Amino acid sequence: MGKYFLLIVGFLFSFQSFGQNPKIDKLEMLFSQKHYKRVHRKANRLLDNPEYDFSMMPSYYKSLSLFELAQNKFWLMRHSSALKDAKKLFLEVKHSENGTKIFNAHMYEIAWLKSDLISWASDLKRMGEGDQFLKVQAVIEDVFGDFDLATLPDENVKVDKQELQNSPENAKSNDLRSSIIAHAKNYIGVPYVWAGSSPKGFDCSGFTSYMMQDAGKKIPRRSSDQYTSANKIKKKDVQKGDLVFFDNGSGISHVGLVISEKGKPLTMIHSSSSKGIIITNVETSKYWSQRLSGYGSYLE
């Protein structure tokens, strides 16, 4: 009888993994808001709760929070096994009986995590931290090697090539901002490359620094340094040719080049880790809108 009861309880909590469960919903909400320490603490408490012995969701959110927290070098110094622990938990969930269902239901979070880790690895490579770069790169390959995330919607704006050719921005103009945007659009489709800064492949800050340099503006190479040295501007003053910066919870981790007119919905061209150079409407993208950190300009 007791064994039968446990099977019923297990079934119920397996079902709750995909249904409404306030505590799991809270983890999802906190993770989307980048409260990674709170996610980590709450997931640990649920793992200690026997009622969740049949649910993989606390392990899932603990692994995601560990991956994100590990990107803070000071936090990682105090928790040296974080990457190893995160990978172990993630793979346990992946290979569990309900792993496929869990990942299919949370594919956006997994795509976001992969993007954050790729940005982190790119920064490590640029900063010459070769050993740590290799560790993170190995984790990315082990964890995401067989995931097909390229088919996920990226809220990217579809671009008509003929429309680009006929755009006023393609006409000869003395408007520096327009000429930068017109030039940037020529690279749509160029692949993402770790630490890439040439037309063969760009990472996010490699693309923005390349575009600014081509316009006669030399700016720092790293996205965080670009943010630090840029002239800060308010959202209402942002216009095409300015830069928009994003924070994944561990500091500035991504940068894009604004292509929208002042006062229009914020749209950027940037190097996406999954699709290369694309155009994205920031305001309709759940991922980017939640990570938006600020704006800067080198054209004032």
Image (cartoon, helix red, strand yellow):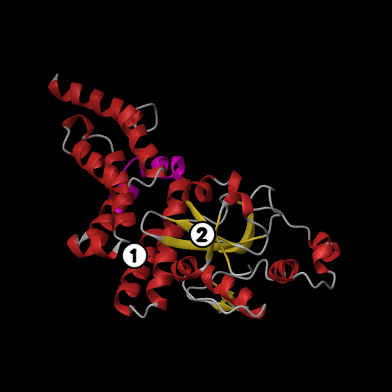
- Relative to 41, 295 lies left or right: right
Q: Is residue 56 visible?
A: no
- Residue 57: % across, % down: 31, 39
Residue 291: x, y in percent? Answer: 47, 51
Instruction: State the quadrant of the N terminus.
Output: top left
Badge 2 local density, few (<14 within 10 Å), some, or many (20+)?
Answer: many
Instruction: Give the Cα distance between marks 1 and 2.
Output: 26 Å
Q: Image height check: is 47 above or below 139?
A: above
Q: Which residue is mark 2?
A: 245
Report the span colored magenta.
91-106
> Does dot 1 land on a helix, a strand or a loop?
helix
Which image quadrant for residue 211?
bottom right
The residue closer to the viewer here, 44 or 238, is 238
Residue 183 lies, in percent from the top left, at 72, 72
User: What crowding class fits label 1: few (fewer than 14 Cα within 10 Å), some (14-19), or many (20 or more)?
Assistant: some
Give me the residue at 37% from left, 73% from top. 124
Given residues 240 and 130, the one toward you in this image is 240
At horizontal 42% and vertical 77% (from top left) the residue drawn is 126
Chief secondary structure of the magenta portion: helix
Q: Nearer the viewer, residue 148 or 36?
A: 36
**Dot 2: what SS?**
strand
Horizontally, residue 26 falls left or right of residue 118, namely left
Q: In terms of sequence position, does the residue under pointer 1 or pointer 2 come before the other?
A: 1
Residue for badge 1: 139
* CB atoms of marks 1 and 2 within 8 Å: no
Viewer-nearest of labels 1 and 2? Answer: 2
Asked if residue 69 can be seen in this view, the reply is yes
Residue 276 forms part of the magenta stretch: no
Residue type, mark 1 in image? Val
**In magenta segment, residue 96:** yes
Q: Is residue 19 left or right of residue 243?
A: left
